[in-house]
Image (cartoon, rainbow, N blue to C red):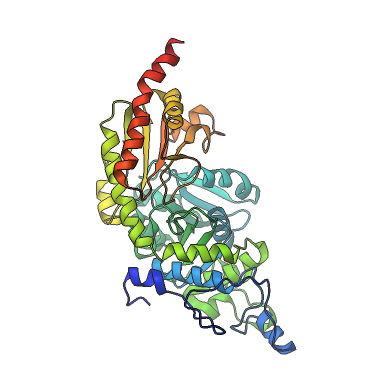
Amino acid sequence: MSELGFETRQVHAGSIVDAEAGARVTPIYQSAGYVFDSFDDGVERFAGRSARRAYSRNDNPTNVVAARRIADLEGGVDGVLVASGQAAIAMALSALAQAGDHILTTDRLYEGTREMIRGALRRNGLEFEAVPIDADEDAWVAAVRPQTRAIYAESIANPLGEVADLALLGRVSARTGVPLVVDNTVATPYLCRPIEHGAAIVIHSTSKWLGGHGSSIGGAIVDGGRFDWTAAAARFPHLHEPRPHGAPSFAERFGDAALGAYLRSVVVLEHGPTVPPTSAFLLLHGIETLSLRMERHVANAVAVAAALREHPAVARVHYPGVGDGQADKVARLLPDGAGSIVSIELAGGRDAARTFLDSLRLVSQMTHIGDVRTLAIHTGSTIHGKLRGEERTALGITEGLVRLSIGIELVDDIVADLRQALDVVPSRVLEVVRA
Protein backbone atom coordinates (compact mmCIF):
# COMPACT_ATOMS: atom_id res chain seq x y z
CA MET A 1 0.00 0.00 0.00
CA SER A 2 3.04 2.24 -0.33
CA GLU A 3 1.30 4.41 -2.96
CA LEU A 4 -1.25 5.50 -0.36
CA GLY A 5 -0.66 8.16 2.29
CA PHE A 6 0.48 7.42 5.82
CA GLU A 7 -2.86 8.39 7.33
CA THR A 8 -4.67 5.97 5.01
CA ARG A 9 -2.24 3.13 5.57
CA GLN A 10 -2.44 3.40 9.36
CA VAL A 11 -6.11 2.43 8.97
CA HIS A 12 -5.92 -0.14 6.17
CA ALA A 13 -2.43 -1.64 5.75
CA GLY A 14 -2.23 -5.37 6.32
CA SER A 15 -5.93 -5.70 7.07
CA ILE A 16 -7.98 -8.77 6.24
CA VAL A 17 -11.71 -9.24 5.82
CA ASP A 18 -12.86 -12.22 7.85
CA ALA A 19 -13.81 -14.98 5.39
CA GLU A 20 -16.59 -16.39 7.56
CA ALA A 21 -18.53 -13.28 8.55
CA GLY A 22 -17.06 -10.54 6.37
CA ALA A 23 -16.09 -8.48 9.42
CA ARG A 24 -14.46 -5.19 8.43
CA VAL A 25 -12.58 -4.87 11.74
CA THR A 26 -9.84 -7.48 12.14
CA PRO A 27 -11.26 -10.09 14.55
CA ILE A 28 -9.57 -11.48 17.65
CA TYR A 29 -8.50 -14.96 16.62
CA GLN A 30 -8.38 -16.43 20.12
CA SER A 31 -7.03 -19.82 19.14
CA ALA A 32 -3.84 -21.67 19.98
CA GLY A 33 -3.84 -23.77 16.83
CA TYR A 34 -5.49 -24.41 13.45
CA VAL A 35 -7.07 -27.53 12.02
CA PHE A 36 -5.10 -29.33 9.32
CA ASP A 37 -7.05 -30.39 6.23
CA SER A 38 -5.17 -33.65 6.09
CA PHE A 39 -2.04 -35.52 7.19
CA ASP A 40 -0.12 -34.09 4.24
CA ASP A 41 -1.40 -30.58 4.93
CA GLY A 42 0.11 -30.76 8.42
CA VAL A 43 3.42 -31.90 6.98
CA GLU A 44 3.45 -29.02 4.50
CA ARG A 45 2.63 -26.43 7.17
CA PHE A 46 5.39 -27.59 9.52
CA ALA A 47 7.89 -27.77 6.66
CA GLY A 48 7.16 -24.13 5.81
CA ARG A 49 6.02 -25.02 2.31
CA SER A 50 2.44 -23.96 2.94
CA ALA A 51 1.24 -20.39 3.37
CA ARG A 52 -1.30 -21.61 5.91
CA ARG A 53 -0.47 -21.30 9.61
CA ALA A 54 0.44 -24.08 12.00
CA TYR A 55 0.45 -22.55 15.48
CA SER A 56 -0.29 -19.27 17.25
CA ARG A 57 3.02 -19.10 19.05
CA ASN A 58 4.43 -17.23 16.07
CA ASP A 59 1.58 -16.96 13.55
CA ASN A 60 -1.75 -15.70 14.88
CA PRO A 61 -3.88 -13.88 12.27
CA THR A 62 -4.69 -10.89 14.50
CA ASN A 63 -1.02 -10.48 15.37
CA VAL A 64 0.05 -10.82 11.76
CA VAL A 65 -2.21 -7.94 10.68
CA ALA A 66 -0.76 -5.67 13.38
CA ALA A 67 2.81 -6.62 12.49
CA ARG A 68 2.26 -6.05 8.78
CA ARG A 69 0.66 -2.67 9.43
CA ILE A 70 3.63 -1.49 11.51
CA ALA A 71 6.05 -2.80 8.87
CA ASP A 72 4.14 -0.93 6.17
CA LEU A 73 4.22 2.34 8.11
CA GLU A 74 7.96 1.95 8.70
CA GLY A 75 8.62 1.18 5.03
CA GLY A 76 9.74 -2.39 5.75
CA VAL A 77 8.95 -5.69 4.08
CA ASP A 78 8.01 -7.84 7.07
CA GLY A 79 7.05 -7.50 10.71
CA VAL A 80 6.84 -9.77 13.72
CA LEU A 81 4.83 -9.02 16.84
CA VAL A 82 6.19 -10.11 20.25
CA ALA A 83 5.18 -9.82 23.89
CA SER A 84 6.98 -6.56 24.82
CA GLY A 85 9.52 -3.99 23.70
CA GLN A 86 12.16 -5.80 25.76
CA ALA A 87 11.30 -9.02 23.93
CA ALA A 88 11.63 -7.20 20.61
CA ILE A 89 15.18 -6.11 21.49
CA ALA A 90 16.14 -9.56 22.75
CA MET A 91 14.67 -11.38 19.74
CA ALA A 92 16.20 -8.99 17.18
CA LEU A 93 19.68 -9.30 18.67
CA SER A 94 19.29 -13.07 19.10
CA ALA A 95 18.53 -13.31 15.39
CA LEU A 96 21.79 -11.55 14.59
CA ALA A 97 24.31 -12.66 17.20
CA GLN A 98 25.42 -15.60 19.30
CA ALA A 99 27.84 -16.14 22.19
CA GLY A 100 31.17 -14.46 21.48
CA ASP A 101 29.74 -11.86 19.10
CA HIS A 102 30.08 -8.09 19.53
CA ILE A 103 27.42 -5.38 19.33
CA LEU A 104 27.99 -1.63 19.18
CA THR A 105 25.51 0.73 20.82
CA THR A 106 25.25 4.44 21.42
CA ASP A 107 25.99 5.52 24.98
CA ARG A 108 22.49 6.92 25.35
CA LEU A 109 19.90 4.19 25.77
CA TYR A 110 16.82 3.58 27.89
CA GLU A 111 17.93 2.15 31.23
CA GLY A 112 15.75 -0.95 30.86
CA THR A 113 17.67 -1.76 27.68
CA ARG A 114 21.02 -1.13 29.37
CA GLU A 115 19.97 -3.36 32.25
CA MET A 116 19.18 -6.20 29.85
CA ILE A 117 22.52 -5.64 28.11
CA ARG A 118 24.40 -5.80 31.43
CA GLY A 119 22.38 -8.79 32.58
CA ALA A 120 20.67 -11.42 30.45
CA LEU A 121 22.36 -10.63 27.13
CA ARG A 122 25.87 -10.61 28.62
CA ARG A 123 25.12 -13.88 30.43
CA ASN A 124 24.20 -15.27 27.01
CA GLY A 125 27.73 -14.44 25.85
CA LEU A 126 27.15 -11.25 23.86
CA GLU A 127 29.70 -8.47 24.18
CA PHE A 128 28.53 -4.85 24.04
CA GLU A 129 30.51 -1.68 23.48
CA ALA A 130 29.07 1.81 23.85
CA VAL A 131 30.19 4.55 21.48
CA PRO A 132 29.46 8.24 22.23
CA ILE A 133 26.24 9.23 20.50
CA ASP A 134 27.97 12.25 18.94
CA ALA A 135 31.00 10.26 17.65
CA ASP A 136 31.89 10.86 14.00
CA GLU A 137 31.54 8.34 11.19
CA ASP A 138 35.17 7.25 11.21
CA ALA A 139 35.06 6.60 14.96
CA TRP A 140 32.11 4.26 14.50
CA VAL A 141 33.77 2.45 11.60
CA ALA A 142 36.96 2.04 13.65
CA ALA A 143 34.94 0.43 16.46
CA VAL A 144 33.61 -2.33 14.19
CA ARG A 145 35.32 -5.71 14.60
CA PRO A 146 35.10 -8.94 12.58
CA GLN A 147 32.81 -10.22 15.36
CA THR A 148 30.48 -7.19 15.26
CA ARG A 149 26.96 -8.24 14.38
CA ALA A 150 24.88 -5.09 14.92
CA ILE A 151 24.91 -1.35 15.54
CA TYR A 152 22.14 -0.45 17.96
CA ALA A 153 20.61 2.97 18.62
CA GLU A 154 17.44 4.75 19.72
CA SER A 155 16.13 7.36 17.30
CA ILE A 156 15.24 9.54 20.32
CA ALA A 157 16.82 8.42 23.57
CA ASN A 158 14.74 8.07 26.73
CA PRO A 159 14.67 10.12 29.00
CA LEU A 160 16.87 13.07 27.93
CA GLY A 161 16.00 13.18 24.24
CA GLU A 162 19.42 12.72 22.63
CA VAL A 163 18.85 12.20 18.90
CA ALA A 164 20.96 9.59 17.12
CA ASP A 165 22.28 10.69 13.72
CA LEU A 166 20.64 7.86 11.80
CA ALA A 167 21.96 9.08 8.46
CA LEU A 168 25.52 8.84 9.80
CA LEU A 169 24.89 5.41 11.33
CA GLY A 170 23.31 4.28 8.07
CA ARG A 171 26.53 5.19 6.25
CA VAL A 172 28.53 3.26 8.84
CA SER A 173 26.32 0.24 8.23
CA ALA A 174 26.82 0.50 4.47
CA ARG A 175 30.60 0.86 4.83
CA THR A 176 31.03 -2.04 7.25
CA GLY A 177 28.31 -4.51 6.26
CA VAL A 178 26.94 -4.48 9.82
CA PRO A 179 23.15 -4.02 10.13
CA LEU A 180 21.80 -0.96 11.92
CA VAL A 181 19.06 -1.74 14.46
CA VAL A 182 16.98 1.23 15.63
CA ASP A 183 14.50 1.45 18.48
CA ASN A 184 12.00 3.91 17.07
CA THR A 185 9.54 3.79 19.96
CA VAL A 186 9.70 7.45 21.01
CA ALA A 187 9.60 8.88 17.47
CA THR A 188 7.11 6.42 15.93
CA PRO A 189 7.02 5.94 12.14
CA TYR A 190 4.92 9.09 11.85
CA LEU A 191 7.83 11.31 12.92
CA CYS A 192 10.82 9.22 11.76
CA ARG A 193 11.36 6.20 9.53
CA PRO A 194 14.86 4.84 10.21
CA ILE A 195 14.82 2.48 7.22
CA GLU A 196 14.91 5.54 4.96
CA HIS A 197 18.22 6.48 6.62
CA GLY A 198 19.84 3.05 6.27
CA ALA A 199 18.47 0.98 9.16
CA ALA A 200 18.14 -2.74 8.51
CA ILE A 201 15.80 -3.44 11.44
CA VAL A 202 13.39 -1.27 13.42
CA ILE A 203 11.93 -2.24 16.77
CA HIS A 204 9.11 -0.82 18.87
CA SER A 205 7.58 -1.09 22.25
CA THR A 206 4.04 -1.08 20.90
CA SER A 207 2.76 -0.42 24.43
CA LYS A 208 3.71 3.22 23.94
CA TRP A 209 2.58 5.66 21.22
CA LEU A 210 1.65 3.03 18.62
CA GLY A 211 -1.05 1.72 20.94
CA GLY A 212 -1.41 4.97 22.82
CA HIS A 213 -4.01 3.84 25.33
CA GLY A 214 -1.75 2.19 27.92
CA SER A 215 -3.94 -0.92 28.14
CA SER A 216 -1.63 -3.63 26.77
CA ILE A 217 2.02 -4.63 26.52
CA GLY A 218 3.66 -5.59 23.23
CA GLY A 219 6.63 -5.22 20.93
CA ALA A 220 7.35 -5.34 17.21
CA ILE A 221 10.34 -6.05 14.97
CA VAL A 222 10.40 -4.77 11.38
CA ASP A 223 12.69 -6.13 8.67
CA GLY A 224 13.57 -3.20 6.42
CA GLY A 225 14.28 -5.42 3.42
CA ARG A 226 17.20 -3.27 2.27
CA PHE A 227 20.14 -5.03 3.92
CA ASP A 228 22.12 -7.39 1.69
CA TRP A 229 22.30 -10.56 3.81
CA THR A 230 24.04 -12.43 0.99
CA ALA A 231 26.94 -9.97 0.90
CA ALA A 232 27.19 -10.34 4.69
CA ALA A 233 27.11 -14.15 4.62
CA ALA A 234 30.34 -14.46 6.62
CA ARG A 235 28.78 -12.57 9.53
CA PHE A 236 25.42 -14.34 9.38
CA PRO A 237 26.00 -17.95 8.28
CA HIS A 238 22.79 -19.12 9.95
CA LEU A 239 20.79 -17.33 7.26
CA HIS A 240 22.63 -19.28 4.56
CA GLU A 241 22.52 -22.81 5.95
CA PRO A 242 20.14 -25.28 4.25
CA ARG A 243 16.94 -25.85 6.20
CA PRO A 244 15.43 -29.19 7.30
CA HIS A 245 13.22 -31.16 4.90
CA GLY A 246 15.50 -30.12 2.04
CA ALA A 247 14.26 -26.52 2.10
CA PRO A 248 16.55 -23.77 0.78
CA SER A 249 18.25 -21.37 3.19
CA PHE A 250 16.47 -18.25 4.38
CA ALA A 251 18.71 -16.08 2.21
CA GLU A 252 18.00 -18.19 -0.88
CA ARG A 253 14.27 -18.31 -0.33
CA PHE A 254 13.56 -14.81 1.01
CA GLY A 255 16.48 -12.69 -0.22
CA ASP A 256 16.64 -9.27 1.43
CA ALA A 257 13.67 -10.25 3.63
CA ALA A 258 15.55 -13.21 5.11
CA LEU A 259 15.79 -11.85 8.62
CA GLY A 260 12.05 -11.38 9.09
CA ALA A 261 11.42 -14.96 8.00
CA TYR A 262 14.19 -16.25 10.29
CA LEU A 263 12.79 -14.28 13.22
CA ARG A 264 9.32 -15.72 12.80
CA SER A 265 10.27 -19.29 11.87
CA VAL A 266 13.16 -19.83 14.29
CA VAL A 267 13.83 -17.21 16.95
CA VAL A 268 10.27 -16.34 17.98
CA LEU A 269 9.09 -19.92 17.52
CA GLU A 270 11.86 -21.25 19.78
CA HIS A 271 11.74 -18.54 22.47
CA GLY A 272 7.96 -18.15 22.45
CA PRO A 273 7.43 -14.46 23.40
CA THR A 274 3.85 -14.59 22.14
CA VAL A 275 1.63 -11.53 22.40
CA PRO A 276 -2.05 -12.33 23.10
CA PRO A 277 -4.31 -11.58 20.12
CA THR A 278 -6.49 -9.46 22.43
CA SER A 279 -3.49 -7.14 22.87
CA ALA A 280 -2.87 -7.06 19.12
CA PHE A 281 -6.55 -6.16 18.60
CA LEU A 282 -6.18 -3.18 20.97
CA LEU A 283 -2.93 -2.21 19.28
CA LEU A 284 -4.61 -2.10 15.86
CA HIS A 285 -7.22 0.31 17.18
CA GLY A 286 -4.46 2.54 18.54
CA ILE A 287 -2.49 2.60 15.30
CA GLU A 288 -5.55 3.84 13.39
CA THR A 289 -5.26 7.25 15.08
CA LEU A 290 -1.46 7.47 15.37
CA SER A 291 -0.96 10.52 13.15
CA LEU A 292 -3.74 12.48 14.85
CA ARG A 293 -2.40 11.70 18.30
CA MET A 294 1.24 12.41 17.43
CA GLU A 295 0.36 15.85 16.09
CA ARG A 296 -1.34 16.65 19.40
CA HIS A 297 1.40 14.99 21.49
CA VAL A 298 4.10 17.05 19.78
CA ALA A 299 2.20 20.34 19.92
CA ASN A 300 1.50 19.83 23.61
CA ALA A 301 5.10 18.86 24.38
CA VAL A 302 6.48 21.95 22.65
CA ALA A 303 4.07 24.15 24.60
CA VAL A 304 4.86 22.46 27.92
CA ALA A 305 8.62 22.74 27.38
CA ALA A 306 8.28 26.44 26.66
CA ALA A 307 6.01 27.05 29.66
CA LEU A 308 8.19 25.21 32.17
CA ARG A 309 11.41 26.81 30.99
CA GLU A 310 10.35 30.07 32.63
CA HIS A 311 9.45 28.64 36.05
CA PRO A 312 11.93 29.51 38.83
CA ALA A 313 11.81 25.99 40.31
CA VAL A 314 13.05 24.50 37.01
CA ALA A 315 16.80 24.53 36.43
CA ARG A 316 16.69 22.97 32.97
CA VAL A 317 14.25 21.58 30.42
CA HIS A 318 15.26 18.74 28.10
CA TYR A 319 13.46 18.59 24.75
CA PRO A 320 15.22 17.61 21.50
CA GLY A 321 16.48 20.53 19.44
CA VAL A 322 15.76 23.24 22.01
CA GLY A 323 18.93 24.70 23.52
CA ASP A 324 20.81 21.39 23.36
CA GLY A 325 22.85 21.74 20.16
CA GLN A 326 20.66 19.23 18.30
CA ALA A 327 18.66 21.61 16.11
CA ASP A 328 20.37 20.45 12.92
CA LYS A 329 19.74 16.75 13.59
CA VAL A 330 16.15 17.39 14.57
CA ALA A 331 15.55 19.41 11.40
CA ARG A 332 17.07 16.66 9.22
CA LEU A 333 15.66 13.58 10.94
CA LEU A 334 12.53 14.78 12.75
CA PRO A 335 11.03 17.59 10.65
CA ASP A 336 7.50 16.92 11.91
CA GLY A 337 8.40 16.97 15.60
CA ALA A 338 10.72 15.48 18.21
CA GLY A 339 8.28 13.38 20.19
CA SER A 340 6.51 14.11 23.44
CA ILE A 341 8.95 13.36 26.24
CA VAL A 342 9.90 16.47 28.19
CA SER A 343 12.31 16.00 31.09
CA ILE A 344 12.86 18.73 33.66
CA GLU A 345 15.59 19.21 36.25
CA LEU A 346 14.32 20.81 39.44
CA ALA A 347 16.69 23.19 41.18
CA GLY A 348 15.88 21.74 44.59
CA GLY A 349 17.02 18.20 43.73
CA ARG A 350 15.34 15.05 45.05
CA ASP A 351 13.26 16.83 47.71
CA ALA A 352 11.91 19.22 45.10
CA ALA A 353 11.06 16.29 42.83
CA ARG A 354 9.19 14.53 45.64
CA THR A 355 7.18 17.63 46.46
CA PHE A 356 6.42 18.33 42.80
CA LEU A 357 5.29 14.79 42.00
CA ASP A 358 3.18 14.41 45.13
CA SER A 359 1.45 17.74 44.35
CA LEU A 360 0.24 16.75 40.88
CA ARG A 361 -3.52 16.44 40.46
CA LEU A 362 -4.21 15.78 36.79
CA VAL A 363 -0.86 14.28 35.76
CA SER A 364 -0.37 10.64 36.82
CA GLN A 365 2.77 9.63 38.71
CA MET A 366 3.64 6.24 37.19
CA THR A 367 6.10 4.35 34.98
CA HIS A 368 5.04 4.44 31.36
CA ILE A 369 5.36 6.68 28.32
CA GLY A 370 3.35 7.24 25.15
CA ASP A 371 -0.04 7.25 26.84
CA VAL A 372 -2.88 9.59 25.87
CA ARG A 373 -2.62 10.73 29.49
CA THR A 374 0.25 12.89 30.75
CA LEU A 375 2.57 10.90 33.03
CA ALA A 376 5.45 11.81 35.33
CA ILE A 377 8.20 9.88 37.14
CA HIS A 378 11.38 10.54 39.11
CA THR A 379 13.78 8.36 37.12
CA GLY A 380 16.70 8.48 39.56
CA SER A 381 14.79 6.61 42.27
CA THR A 382 12.89 4.24 39.96
CA ILE A 383 14.12 3.40 36.45
CA HIS A 384 17.72 4.37 37.28
CA GLY A 385 17.44 3.42 40.94
CA LYS A 386 19.79 0.42 40.69
CA LEU A 387 22.71 2.55 39.49
CA ARG A 388 25.33 4.09 41.72
CA GLY A 389 25.29 7.86 42.09
CA GLU A 390 28.27 8.40 39.81
CA GLU A 391 26.72 6.18 37.15
CA ARG A 392 23.54 8.23 37.16
CA THR A 393 25.56 11.44 36.98
CA ALA A 394 27.49 10.15 33.95
CA LEU A 395 24.18 9.55 32.18
CA GLY A 396 22.85 12.99 33.06
CA ILE A 397 20.32 11.65 35.57
CA THR A 398 20.39 14.33 38.25
CA GLU A 399 18.68 14.14 41.64
CA GLY A 400 16.05 16.60 40.50
CA LEU A 401 15.27 15.01 37.12
CA VAL A 402 11.62 14.28 36.39
CA ARG A 403 10.52 12.71 33.11
CA LEU A 404 7.21 13.84 31.67
CA SER A 405 5.38 11.97 28.93
CA ILE A 406 3.04 14.61 27.56
CA GLY A 407 -0.44 13.39 26.68
CA ILE A 408 -3.21 14.72 24.47
CA GLU A 409 -5.30 16.51 27.09
CA LEU A 410 -6.01 20.22 26.65
CA VAL A 411 -2.55 21.75 26.91
CA ASP A 412 -3.76 24.57 29.16
CA ASP A 413 -4.91 21.99 31.69
CA ILE A 414 -1.58 20.13 31.54
CA VAL A 415 0.42 23.31 32.01
CA ALA A 416 -1.82 24.52 34.83
CA ASP A 417 -1.35 21.28 36.77
CA LEU A 418 2.41 21.26 36.28
CA ARG A 419 2.68 24.90 37.31
CA GLN A 420 0.60 24.53 40.45
CA ALA A 421 2.76 21.58 41.52
CA LEU A 422 5.94 23.56 40.77
CA ASP A 423 4.60 26.52 42.73
CA VAL A 424 4.54 24.35 45.85
CA VAL A 425 8.17 23.34 45.46
CA PRO A 426 10.08 26.40 46.77
CA SER A 427 8.28 26.66 50.10
CA ARG A 428 8.16 22.90 50.76
CA VAL A 429 11.87 22.45 49.93
CA LEU A 430 12.77 25.40 52.15
CA GLU A 431 10.84 23.81 55.01
CA VAL A 432 12.79 20.55 54.58
CA VAL A 433 16.11 22.35 54.52
CA ARG A 434 15.28 24.29 57.69
CA ALA A 435 14.20 21.13 59.48
Q: Nearer the viewer, residue 347 or 264?
A: 347
Indicate left or right for 375 with 314 as reference. right
Q: Is residue 177 visible?
A: no
Q: 429 or 49, which lies in front?
A: 429
Residue shown at 58% from the left, 56% from the top:
87
> Is 10 on the left-hand or right-hand side of 216?
left
Residue at 30%, 35% (x, y): give it. 308
The quadrant where residue 118 appears: top right
Q: Is residue 15 visible?
A: yes
Q: Position of residue 309 (x, y in %)?
A: 27, 34
Report x, y in % for residue 344: 36, 35
Q: Position of residue 143 (x, y in %)?
A: 45, 49
Q: Nearer the viewer, residue 333 or 42?
A: 42
Q: Residue at x 47, y 76 (%)?
A: 15
Percent x, y of residue 294: 34, 56
**In the picture shown, does residue 307 fall above or below 33?**
above
Q: Quadrant of the rendered structure where residue 400 is?
A: top left
